[in-house]
Amino acid sequence: GSTERVGSPTLTTVHGAESPAVRTGKRFWVSILVQMELQEKFRRNFFRKLKDLEVLDLNENDIRGEISSEIKHMKNLRYLRLSYNRFTALPSEMAELKNLSHVFIQGNRLSGDDKHVTVHNRQDEGYQFISDCGSPTDAAEPFVCSECDMCCNSLEECQEPLVPQLDGYSAAGVIVAAVFGALVTVWIILRHLAKRGKVRSSTSSAIKAAGDDSVYSFVLTKSKSGWLIVLLTVFIQVLVLGLFLQASDFSNDDGDFVYSFRCPRNTDECNDERAVTTYGWFVWIFLVFSSLLDDLANGVKLLILSATRGSTQCFISGLTIFCIATLAIYTSFTYNRAIAITNTE
């Protein structure tokens, strides 16, 4: 039959029906054959007879079940491509394969994790470990892959894993804590300078600094109902922003994250269809900061007033305004990065 070179320069697939499988040296030829016959060979002593093999490509053969533990005999295996079959689990014996440099197991129904798979000779370019660690999945449980450089889902959409992976509320907490710490440090420095007379007290009105129509101006009053309104507003804002952060989380099965990579079945390469350019992010910066610049400026003004006057109310109001505005900017960036495929999105 005719031959076609695929995947690796050392692997050739023969299209024909005369011979199910032929082994010569370090190469393995596989024909289009009856699926049940290949499946039976795969479960029996298939791997033991191919112990010198360096490249194995059984892509898209509808092989089902668990990968046999006999794969441990293939000590020289460098390139393993079992993608687009119906495998359900990886054997622990894969840990004995010390020469693996490329593993492609996406398009299966794998559960469990990759703790028994180690990819050696990592390179700066190309993808060397692709699996079913994306969402949604056809597996009983999601496959967890900590070492993969590409995760695919059951829709054949793929994405480079994003780390660190914090859920929405954890990310919100980290951002708020970091901004809070930085602002408190700056405030302590300003307060120290003000006491020594090196920073003059501002004559600006605190209410005006907070914004005449801002709900945070209630902090500057002694009204208990006003403070309650402020607390409720902060709670709702953090809740909403946290929901958007959670929706943009790569690991959230019910989120809005858009997988932008495609890894065609006839190749081990992946292409990114995301077309967001620097111009798109420049427009985003302009729109976001033009809408939140007043809040950021008001927060800074109130912090300066609190440092020069020793006002606790100005400090709380300024800190709250600045933290919420910063969290809104981070949320907008994270969500847009998760869902945007083009500049207009």
Image (cartoon, helix red, strand yellow):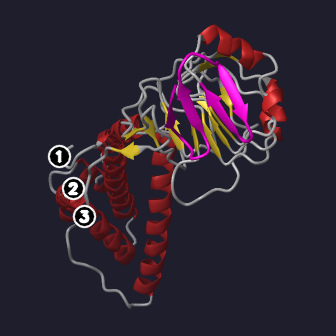
Upstream in sequence: badge 3 or badge 1 = 3
Of residues 57 and 89, the one drawn nearer to the viewer in this rendering: 57
Foreground: disc 3 or disc 2:
2
Q: At numbered mark 3, what does the secondary structure look like: helix, strand or loop? A: helix
Q: Find residue 289 and report its image quarter.
A: bottom left
Q: At numbered mark 1, what does the secondary structure look like: helix, strand or loop? A: loop
Q: Say which amino acid is labelled 2.
A: Gly
Measured Cα–Cα span from mark 3 to mark 2: 28 Å
Disc on res. 344: 1
Q: Position of residue 184 (x, y in %)?
A: 47, 67
Which residue is at a point 45% across and 54% down the rendered structure image? 176
The segment highlighted magenta reads 1-30
Whether residue 3 is visible: yes
Disc on res. 280: 2
Of residues 288 and 229, the one drawn nearer to the viewer in this rendering: 288
Q: Position of residue 177 (x, y in %)?
A: 50, 56
Which residue is at a point 18% across and 58% down the rendered structure image? 283
Q: Magenta span has 122?
A: no
Disc on res. 298: 3
Whether residue 131 is visible: no
- Left or right, 99 with respect to 233, comes to right
